[in-house]
Image (cartoon, rainbow, N blue to C red):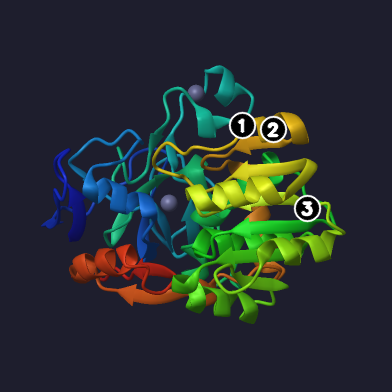
Amino acid sequence: MKALVKYEMKPHALEIRDIPIPEPGPGQIRVKVEYAGICGSDLHIYHNSIAITTRPPVVVGHEFSGFVDKVGSGVQGWKEGDRIVAEAVYHRCGVCKYCRTGKYNLCLDKLSFGYVYNGCFERYTIVEDYNAHHLPDDIDMISGAMIEPMACVARGIYDQCHLEAGFTVLVSGPGPIGLMATQIAKAEGCEVIVTGTGVDEERLAIAKQLGIDHAVNIEKENLKELVDSLTDGYGVDAVLECSGSQAGINSGLSLVRKCGWFVMIALAGRPITFDIEAMNYKELHFSGSIASTYSNWEKCLWLLHHRKVQLAPLATGIYRLDDWKQAFEDMENKKGLKLLFKPEDD
Ligand SMILES: [Zn+2]
Ligand SMILES: [Zn+2]
């Protein structure tokens, strides 16, 4: 079968290769991949600027939905044809302090699907049963393929931040991650502002269609005036930083209220300069967030099942694996929102 393989730790060392269909070992499930989302970190793998442990040759891709195709020995609760999604933290040691306190996203020996273990930019892939989640019938396969990034957003919001009904929340960056964050904040009863610039007009329009209260092009509208009018001049209660940009981070820090919450959900990918004294003077709760754990996935499945969040409108491009170069180029040029592959049988 065809697979998109990172074959060497060098820039652009990525190509379609013909590899055998894998056999599931004990505790493993073979999945027929229906859709596989392209993540910003796949571009980092392509450019060799990835900070996550990567061991070529490896099939790339870590966001997918599919059907169970074959179960290995000892697997319980799964049968052929079941709808399935799975977490990207493939291997965790189980004995370090983080694993034993349920924070296996921080495991000292964490090895990920699509980085060290063959991922999902191929028709058949292998997952461990302890990483798998049943995808309910009422969540479509395209949305299913976007649960992995949504779970990372859920980690930032539910475990690393604090939201409550009535909060005014600022989400900087209207990309797929930002539009997931806005919808979760809205589902929690918050009034949400999502911000972007001129290049984001299409994305801001989708935010409006999704019912987000305020989708703001900061080049056209005065964001501070809006925040002041919504919060009596106090500032927003929480910032969900989904842009990873210097401007977005600094603007968020200036617009968050005293004792407010600020969580970095986006990966900046480079050092950022910001006024750390703001944390003192505002007594801010500032935190980071990475990957996801079981409870984040269960929360996302609940939110999707109850129609609190919509992912399907974020999928703006579906590509064949053979067209991966075009897909990566479109992604780099911010064409559309979420781009996915639809791997097919040879
Ligand atoms: Zn990802
Ligand atoms: Zn561990």
In percent of width and height, residue 316 lies at 42, 77
- Residue marked by disc 1: 276
Can you tell which quarter of the image residue 199 is in?
bottom left
Percent across and percent down for residue 190 are: 79, 61
Can you identify the residue that label 3 sits on? 235
Would you name the residue on which mark 2 appears? 279
> Who comes first in sequence, dot 3 or dot 2?
3
User: At label 1, which amino acid type do we have?
Assistant: Ile
Asked which quadrant contains residue 31, the reply is: bottom left
Q: First in sequence: mark 3 or mark 1? A: 3
The kind of residue on which mark 3 rests is Gly
Q: In the rendering, at what x and y percent does residue 12 appear?
A: 15, 51
Res 40 seen here: yes
Seen in the picture, residue 52 relative to 173 is either above or below; the reply is: above
Circles 3 and 2: CB atoms closer than 8 Å: no
Is there a contact, CB below 8 Å, between mark 1 and mark 2? Answer: yes
